[in-house]
Amino acid sequence: MSSAILTIVQNQLNENLSTQLLFSTAENVVFFILIAMAIFLIISTPVVLFYFSVDNYFKLKKLKKIIDIDICCKNSRTHNSFKAETCSSYINSYALFIGNIVGLIIWNVLSFIYIFSQNQSTLSGILSYLKFPFEILENYDFNNALSSISSYKYNWIMMSGILIGTLLSYVTIKYFTENMIRNKVSKNIKTYSLT
């Protein structure tokens, strides 16, 4: 009787341990995926900003051929909906272009602050800046995930600050540029409405 109870208790403990191990492994895998996504977001932000600034630059050139910027679609031969749509596209592309450029500038300024504040020499700062994402992934310990991440706490704080500062400046500049242009256009051209 007692050996049967011991066998049942031992089987229950084994099931609990295997379930706990499964949950721990799943937690570590999810944590690793989140870290990899954060690193990808940090690495890809300047590339995305650069790509979209170039893309919006070419959209602006195309739209400049369609409209006269000084009078913003005052050609009487085109339909009013085409005028408004073209004006809105131009304003939106212009705001996105300015937002992307300012985001890139802020990214570079904050990155240089990080590089020069952390290290004594510029070369070691640049190497630390470029190696950070790869060192995180290389030194990641599935059994002790939080301690392997916390060893790079300063880097995480600085990189997160760079990312947040860049995104906030992008959104702020894009919003103010778009509103400023729309207000100026609507004051100068009475037929243009704020859409």
Image: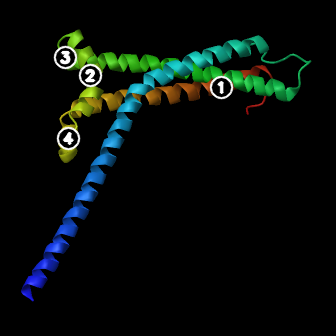
* Residue 112 relative to residue 86: left or right: left
Which callout, 3 or 2, points at the residue further toward the start of the chain?
Answer: 3
Q: Are marks 4 and 2 in contact (CB under 8 Å)?
A: no
Helix, strand or loop at mark 3: loop
Q: Alpha-carbon neighbours of circle 4 within 10 Å: few (<14), some, or many (≥20)?
A: some
Nearest to viewer (mark 4 / mark 1): 4
Sequence-wise, the earlier of marks 1 and 3 is 1
Name the residue beneath numbered marker 4.
141
Question: Residue sitting at 24 percent across and 28 percent down?
Answer: 135
Helix, strand or loop status at disc 4:
loop
Q: Is residue 98 visible?
A: no
Question: Which of labels 4 and 2 is toward the front?
Answer: 4
Marks 2 and 1, how far apart at CA: 37 Å
Residue denoted by label 1: 92
Is the residue 151 above or below the residue 43 in the image?
Answer: below
Q: Which residue is mark 3?
A: 119
Q: Is residue 28 above or below residue 114?
A: below
Residue type marked 1 = Asn
* Precedes in sequence: disc 3 or disc 4: 3
Of circles 2 and 1, which is in front? 2
Quote the CA–CA distance across marks 3 and 4.
Answer: 26 Å
Residue at point 73%, 21% (across, down) = 185
Mark identifier at residue 131? 2
Cβ–Cβ under 8 Å for marks 4 and 1? no
